[in-house]
Image: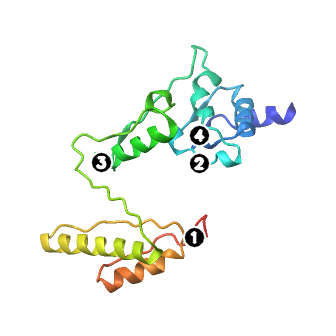
Amino acid sequence: RDVLEHYQQRFKYIMVDEYQDTNSVQYLWLRLLAQERKNIACVGDDDQSIYGWRGATAANLEAFVEDFPTAQGPAPKKQLTTSWRNPPEVLDLANGVSDAVLGPAETRAVATLEARPGADAGEVTLGFFPHHDAEIAFVADRLAQEYREASETGRPFSAAALVRKNRHSPVLAAALEERGVPYEIVGLAGLLD
C-alpha cells in the first residue's frame, strides 16, 4: 500500500495516449493510480488498435467513461472527428474498411472521421502486384507523373511514400532517382527492421 500511495502522490495528473492498446495489467495499474485524485485523461481510437496479440483490448477505451467516473457521474467524453489532413475519398475508404472489419461505426467507441469543411478531393488507387519490383515501379512512375504535372503547372510537389521496412527505402529512392524525382529519406531507424 505504501508503494501505491507514493505513486498516487507523485503523479498529480495522468495522461495516456493510445489507450486502445492497453492490456488488463496496464488498465488495473491506471485505475489504482487514478483512484485517489481522479485526474486522468486518455486518448485513443478503437479503429487503430493493433496490439491484441499481446493482450491489449480496445474495450478499455469503450469502458473508460464508466471505469473512471467523476463525482458527477460518468467521465466526460470528447471526440475529435474532423480529419484535417485526409480527403473525403480516403476517409470513405478507411471508414468502409473499419465498418467491414470492426462492425458498424455506431457500435464502436469512437465516431468515424469526416473530412474538414472545404477539403480538396483526393484519389485512392488500389494495386495488386506480382512482385516487389512491380510495386516499386508503379509507385515511382506515379510519383514521377505527379512531379512532372506539378512542375509544368508551377504548383509545389508534395508526396510521401511509406515503406514497411527501411530496407525498401533505397530501392524506392533509386527508382525515383532514375525518373528524376527529388526525394528525401526520413527516419531510418524503426520498429520493423
Q: Secondary structure at mark 1?
A: loop
Residue tagged by mark 4? 20
Residue tagged by mark 1? 189
Residue found at the far bottom of this picture:
178
Q: Are marks 3 and 2 in contact (CB under 8 Å)?
A: no
Give residue 135's position: percent from left, percent from top: 41, 72
Q: Closer to the observer: label 1 or label 3?
A: 3
Q: Earlier in the sequence, mark 2 or mark 1?
A: 2
Numbered circle sitting on residue 113: none
The answer to whether residue 111 is left or right of residue 21 is left
Structural distance between the alpha carbons of marks 2 and 4: 8 Å
Residue tagged by mark 2? 50
Q: Secondary structure at mark 2?
A: loop
Screen quadrant of the C terminus = bottom right
The answer to whether residue 184 is left or right of residue 116 is right
Q: Earlier in the sequence, mark 1 or mark 4?
A: 4
Q: Amino acid at mark 4?
A: Gln
Q: Residue at x 24, y 69 (%)?
A: 146
